[in-house]
Amino acid sequence: MTRFRLLFPVSVVLCFFLASPVAATLVLSDVSFTPTAPLVPGGQQHVVATYSVIPSGSTTFSKGHSLQMQTDLARAQWTIQVTLDGRDAARQTASGSAAFVNGAILSYSTDHDVGMVVTLDGMVPADAIGSLMVLQVEELDNSGTLVPGSILSVTQPVAGPASPDATPVIPTLTPPLVTTTLPKAAPGLALPVVVSALIVAVLLVRGTSRKR
């Protein structure tokens, strides 16, 4: 009787762990950005991220769990493609800053290879500075609570604000004012008056000489 009492709690604990869903491990195997980093504020951004689902229990992913995806890109458009043994399986789309994936479309027996390709298109916020969280994936349990250690976040640096083109300043050169000082006329009769008087005198002398 005592032995049964000791074994009963142990059996209950073992059954609890065996029955509890085990979180799968999501691995980011590849990610690409178009255009490449740094992100340009106000510019369009295209992201393709590939994930592998590594099972930790009897299935590749717990049917009762889900994935929540988030982005800080504006006007985000999502395409989520599940792959099974290298071939396309379930596919879903979403829009907005968040998207959710039901665990049922990721749950297969462990003899299968399950992956996921997330394609995200959005706009880099015009006021973005420093770095931007482009894509974050986290696993939620049956109650919607975050599974510890399941967050996978992808961030990218943001380019600084574009500096305006420098406009060369060409100085306006003002030529110096040149003043010319005219020589002052000598005191006495002006030169034209003297010349005219001499001409008149010569004419008078000639006229007198002819009369004689």
Image (cartoon, grey):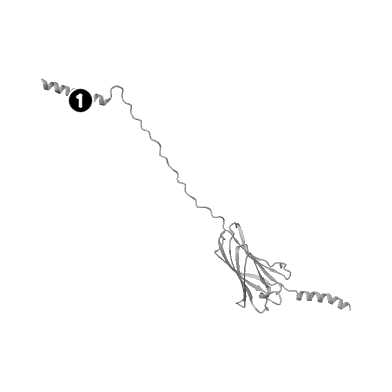
Q: In this rendering, would 15 be left or right of 119?
A: right
Q: Residue at x 25, y 24 (%)?
A: 193
Q: Residue at x 60, y 63 (%)?
A: 75
Secondary structure of the residue carrying tag 1 is helix
Vertical relation: 204 (above or below) 2: above
Q: Residue at x 84, y 77 (%)?
A: 8
Q: Residue at x 81, y 75 (%)?
A: 12
Q: Amino acid at mark 1?
A: Ile
Image spot of residue 110 (x, y percent): 68, 78
- In the image, farthest residue toward the top: 212
Location of residue 15 by image quarter? bottom right
Mark 1 — residue?
199
In the rendered image, which quarter contains the C terminus?
Answer: top left
Image spot of residue 174 (x, y percent): 42, 40
Q: In this rendering, would 131 be left or right of 56?
A: left
Vertical relation: 115 (above or below) 210: below
Location of residue 16 by image quarter? bottom right
- In the image, farthest residue toward the right: 1
Q: In this rendering, would 72 be left or right of 57?
A: left
Image spot of residue 150 (x, y percent): 69, 68
